[in-house]
Image (tube, rainbow, N blue to C red):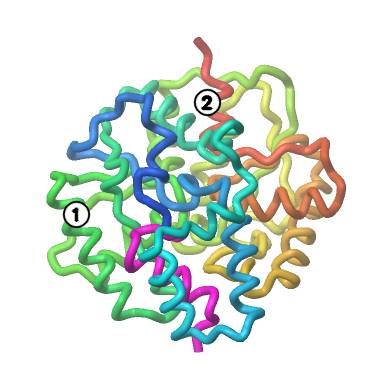
């Protein structure tokens, strides 16, 4: 019952520990010059969505090709294994990102490190030892595999002495905080999303955007509906001098419209996903905002696609980490 394309992702997570099935070292390249410790009681959890952000479109394209082919779910698992055994990185072949261009999708990660460091928070980054949270397995209905993955991830954290996690991707945060707690005995990790940490420490930051600007905010579904983080990101934006927060009249907070991404939906149902992305982009454009802010790599990808379809090239989409980092003085 699972679409072959999602079966491919599932196998990547189970056998390689990330959505793309890429070498773990590739995902950690963004931090190679930051000299972050690789072990500590508090860690920064980057997540697949940001670490492989520049290749997510390529992955979605690949999944659509698999789903439209005659390949069945069982064969999709087999093809993924065969691909890895012979050392072929298919998503690399589809990627539009070259080594010369770097990885612009990693900017939110580097900005998050900058902000957390400014707050005086001491943290480590597990780099190539960071496990996949396994969340997509849960949403695909592969509950046995998900339970195994969460136990594996939890054991990895404990072996590294982890007690607290600061996570950047809403889906990963919910998985680590709630779903993992439901599946692992004696679970004892404290998990917070980046916006929670910043909101709790706002008084220690002086924030001023380089110019006067109208900003609107898009609520990621998991952040607002599963983690109940509605006011924290808005408190952050309102604390930035030069930023005027403008929002839709009612499609915000718990009533925010979905961007059409998440859980592989954009890959399996691309036409419907595009309609939802365009509709949400229209709602946010109607506020007159020059910048759309959202703390989710999937939402960023979707909203950029919606804006591109609407030919709204004068509106930027930024992660919350980026606008905070841009607003820090000194």
The image shows residue 210, relative to residue 144, as above or below, that is above
Q: Quadrant of residue 276?
A: bottom right
> Label 2: few (<14), some or many (≥20) within 10 Å?
many
Q: Is residue 318 magenta?
A: no
Marks 1 and 2, how far apart at CA: 31 Å
Can residue 70 be seen? yes
Q: 287 or 9, which is in the foreground?
A: 9
Question: Farthest residue in the right direction?
Answer: 311
Q: Which residue is mark 1?
A: 156
Q: What percent of the width, then of the height, locates residue 163? A: 18, 46
> x%, y% of residue 190?
25, 50
Viewer-nearest of discs 1 and 2: 1
Pick out the residue farthest to the front: 86
Query: Mark 2 = which residue?
Result: 325
SS for dot 1: helix
- The residue located at (40%, 56%) in the rendering is 172
Vertical placement of 93 versus 240: above or below? below
Q: Would you identify the image quadrant in which residue 166 lies?
A: top left
Residue nearest the viewer, comparing 102 with 43? 102
Which stretch is magenta?
1-21
Confirm whether the magenta stretch covers residue 16.
Answer: yes
* Apparent side of residue 115 relative to residue 150 in the rendered image (left or right): right
Instruction: Looking at the picture, tell me which residue is in the foreground, 207 or 275.
Output: 275
- In the image, is 89 to the left or to the right of 308? left
Which residue is drawn at the image coordinates 54% and 74% (left, top)? Answer: 5
Q: Residue at x 76, y 54 (%)?
A: 306
């Amino acid at each position: 019952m699972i679409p072959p394309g999602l079966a491919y992702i599932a196998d990547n997570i189970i056998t390689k520990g990330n959505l793309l099935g890429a070498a773990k070292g590739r995902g950690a390249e963004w931090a190679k010059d930051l000299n972050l410790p690789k072990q500590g009681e508090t860690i920064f959890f980057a997540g697949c969505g940001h670490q492989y952000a520049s290749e997510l479109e390529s992955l979605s394209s690949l999944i659509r090709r698999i789903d439209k082919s005659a390949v069945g779910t069982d064969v999709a698992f087999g093809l993924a294994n065969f691909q890895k055994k012979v050392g072929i990185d298919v998503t690399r072949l589809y990627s539009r990102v070259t080594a010369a261009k770097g990885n612009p999708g990693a900017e939110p990660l580097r900005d998050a490190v900058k902000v957390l460091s400014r707050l005086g928070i001491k943290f480590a980054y597990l780099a190539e030892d960071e496990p996949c949270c396994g969340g997509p397995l849960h949403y695909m209905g592969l509950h046995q595999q998900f339970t195994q993955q969460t136990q594996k991830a939890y054991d990895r954290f404990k072996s590294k002495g982890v007690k607290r996690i600061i996570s950047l991707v809403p889906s990963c945060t919910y998985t680590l905080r709630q779903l993992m707690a439901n599946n692992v005995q004696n679970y004892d990790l404290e998990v917070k999303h980046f916006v929670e940490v910043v909101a709790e420490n706002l008084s220690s930051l002086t924030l001023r955007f380089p110019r006067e600007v109208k900003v609107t905010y898009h609520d990621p579904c998991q952040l607002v509906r599963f983690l109940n983080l509605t006011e924290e990101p808005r408190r952050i934006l309102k604390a930035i001098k030069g930023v005027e927060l403008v929002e839709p009249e009612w499609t915000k907070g718990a009533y925010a419209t979905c961007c059409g991404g998440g859980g592989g939906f954009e890959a399996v149902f691309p036409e419907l996903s595009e309609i939802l992305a365009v509709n949400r982009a229209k709602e946010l454009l109607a506020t007159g905002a020059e910048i759309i802010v959202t703390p989710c790599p999937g939402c960023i990808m979707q909203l950029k696609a919606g804006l591109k379809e609407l030919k709204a090239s004068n509106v930027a989409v930024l992660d919350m980490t980026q606008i905070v980092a841009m607003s820090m003085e000194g």
